[in-house]
Amino acid sequence: MNKSLNFLQNLIKPFKLRSSKEGQNEEDLEKIAQQEQKLFPFETLVAATKDFHPTHKLGEGGFGPVFKGKLEDGREIAVKKLSHSSNQGKKEFMNEAKLLARVQHRNVVNLLGYCVHGVEKLLVYEYVSNESLDKLLFKSNRREELDWKRRYDIIVGIARGLLYLHEDSHNCIIHRDIKASNILLDDKWVPKIADFGMARLFPEDQTHVNTRVAGTNGYMAPEYVMHGHLSVKADVFSFGVLVLELISSQRNSSFNLQVDAQNLIDWAYKLYKKDRSLEIMDPTLASSAATDQVKMCIQIGLLCTQGDPQLRPVMRRVVVMLSKKHGTLEEPTRPGVPGSRYRRSRRPPGLSTTSGPSGDSESQTFESTSHRTNTTSATASTSSPALDPRGKRPMLS
Ligand SMILES: Nc1ncnc2c1ncn2[C@@H]1O[C@H](COP(=O)(O)OP(=O)(O)OP(=O)(O)O)[C@@H](O)[C@H]1O
């Protein structure tokens, strides 16, 4: 009896082995497929963030809270829990997130993957260790750490990241929300553009909940605020504002000098016309600044913020201009009046929001609103000027 049992067991052994190996293989394949699809299991994110513990919270943006986490393999991540107001279906969200996870550039915050769990939709980003640019530039006493060389490298890095989004990624991505708080710096001061592609994830984005107190942010191109005309030139405008902010350490939106100017770019333009543009420079840069380079960057900032979008350079040209040691650049024309991404009340998307015909958006007071306008980010064709009323993709007019 024992003999025959042994015989039987020996007969079954190889099959048993094979089936457990197959099981292992299946598991491995599943893992590979998950990695390929950039799909994170919810439990992995729960474990990484200690169940989204408040002490792990990095902050809260218009799209929801962000938590710091650590994966089992040691990688640090930032997990963004999207607010439930995204009406996007699961499948569509996954498709869009998968697409965005393919966007990879040294100057863009990498989206490592995503997760859907019940009603929860989460995005998993690489963790960027230094502060966001606005905190360093405007809110801390660490401003001096940003000497001219660092600021110049940051300007060049943002320009390259934007060029990639506009021209070199698989789709043209118009960011629509370039501003100092959306630039994260890593431990080597490399700037990384955050929050790209959000309009793809919030297609009905006029329902986007924004819990923060709204205010003028002063980065939005006038043609976009007033007429809903969206093109890569809207990002170029915001980039120009950012360049001038980086040089002056002043926010365009809360520009408060006792000078005869509406805002920072207006002030910079007036001084430029008098050949005194260097006066906008942050005094802490005096010892580190290469004045010719600073002047050139001011001129580039002014070229990018010109009122007429046609006259603004594309990012490829900006990157070339920044790489020039010397050489003449064209003369900037009058700057446009920047607007705000917030509006007073809900109006049909695409219509004028905050800035009146007089263009005095900077002097207006904006009320807190529970809705964000459709101005986050879009994927579009470079030549598409008009805005998709659903806020997702610009359409050909
Ligand atoms: N990948 C990341 N690495 C490190 N910190 C991050 C990362 N992404 C976001 N954060 C931090 O999380 C906080 C919230 O970021 P989030 O981008 O959601 O909002 P925001 O930029 O403050 O506002 P908005 O939604 O208007 O752009 C910020 O303090 C930001 O610095």
Image (spheres, rainbow, N blue to C red):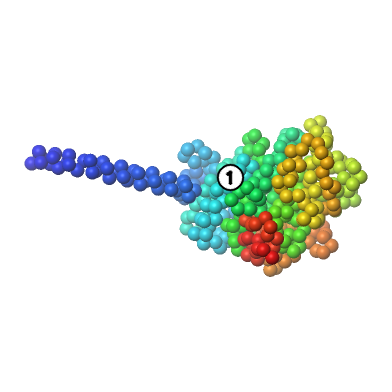
- Residue found farthest to the left: 1
* Circle 1 residue: 104
| Image position of 206 with respect to 61: above or below | below
Determine whether the beta carbon of the residue marked 1 sits less than 8 angstroms from the nearest atom of ligand 1. no
Looking at the image, residue 16 sits to the left or right of residue 241; the answer is left
**In the rendered structure, which amino acid carries the disc numbered 1?**
Gln
How many numbered marks appear? 1
| Image position of 87 with respect to 176: above or below | below
Whether residue 184 is visible to the viewer of this picture, yes or no, is: no
Depth check: 199 or 59 in front?
199
- Residue found farthest to the bottom: 348
Looking at the image, residue 297 sits to the left or right of residue 107; the answer is right
Whether residue 318 is visible to the viewer of this picture, yes or no, is: yes
Q: Check disc 1: other Cα within 10 Å, few if <14, some if 14-19, many if 20+.
A: some
Quarter of the picture containing the C terminus is bottom right
The image shows residue 289 at horizontal and vertical percentages of 80, 34
In the figure, residue 159 lies in which quadrant? Answer: top right
The image shows residue 21 at horizontal and vertical percentages of 30, 42
Depth check: 287 or 243 in front?
243
Q: Residue at x 49, y 48 (%)?
A: 38
Looking at the image, residue 201 sits to the left or right of residue 183; the answer is left
Q: Residue at x 80, y 56 (%)?
A: 308
Q: Residue at x 76, y 42 (%)?
A: 321
The image shows residue 43 at horizontal and vertical percentages of 45, 48
**In terms of secondary structure, where does tag 1 sit?**
loop
- Residue found farthest to the top: 287
Q: Residue at x 61, y 39 (%)?
A: 129
| Image position of 100 with respect to 352: above or below | above
Quarter of the picture containing the N terminus is top left
The image shows residue 243 at horizontal and vertical percentages of 76, 44
